[in-house]
Image (spheres, grey):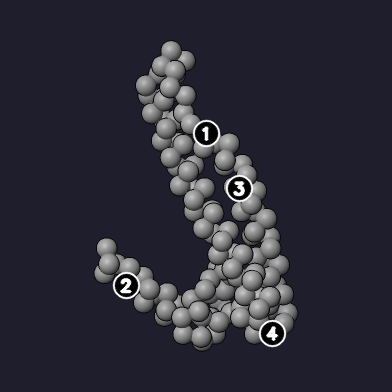
Amino acid sequence: MKPAQIERYEKELIQLEAELMGFLGLSSESSQAVELDQARMGRVSRGDAMQQQAMVSAAHQRDQKHLIAVRKALKRIKNDDYGFCLECGEEINLKRLDVSPETELCLDCQSLQEQRQKTRS
């Protein structure tokens, strides 16, 4: 991979890291415990609030995992390992990196990993 391409991916990853950090900061306010005061809030409203809280919590966890993946990719750039599959060592297709610059696996290895996970379930 050319240095200019790596630099472009690094900029994308840095921007993505900043966005995710912003999302995580905002979503922590929304995930506070739901108030149990029935006089102030009806059952339906409380149920809606609890459902919304669960959705925010799931999004928060997803964003945390995504942030970790982005930071790992930035570390691979610093170590000159970026763009290579962590499983087989082959170069990851640039089109795949364009879609998901934090990806660790080539498409073949990703497919094998997903198949293994399905058989475990």
Q: Mark 4 belongs to which amino acid? A: Lys
Q: Residue furthest top?
A: 39
Residue at image coords 65%, 48%: 22
Name which quarter of the figure residue 47 lies in: top left
Q: Earlier in the sequence, mark 2 or mark 4?
A: 4
Label placed on residue 72: none
Q: Mark 2 belongs to which amino acid? A: Arg
Q: Quadrant of the C terminus?
A: bottom left
Q: Earlier in the sequence, mark 1 or mark 2?
A: 1
* Mark toward the viewer: 4 or 1: 1
Q: Is disc 4 in contact with disc 3, using a CB cutoff of under 8 Å? A: no
Q: Is disc 1 in contact with disc 2, using a CB cutoff of under 8 Å? A: no
Q: Is disc 2 in contact with disc 3, using a CB cutoff of under 8 Å? A: no
Look at mark 2 in the image and give the residue it sits on: 116
Look at mark 3 in the image and give the residue it sits on: 23
* Mark toward the viewer: 4 or 3: 3
On the image, the x and y values in percent for residue 92 come to 53, 81
Circle 2: element type: helix
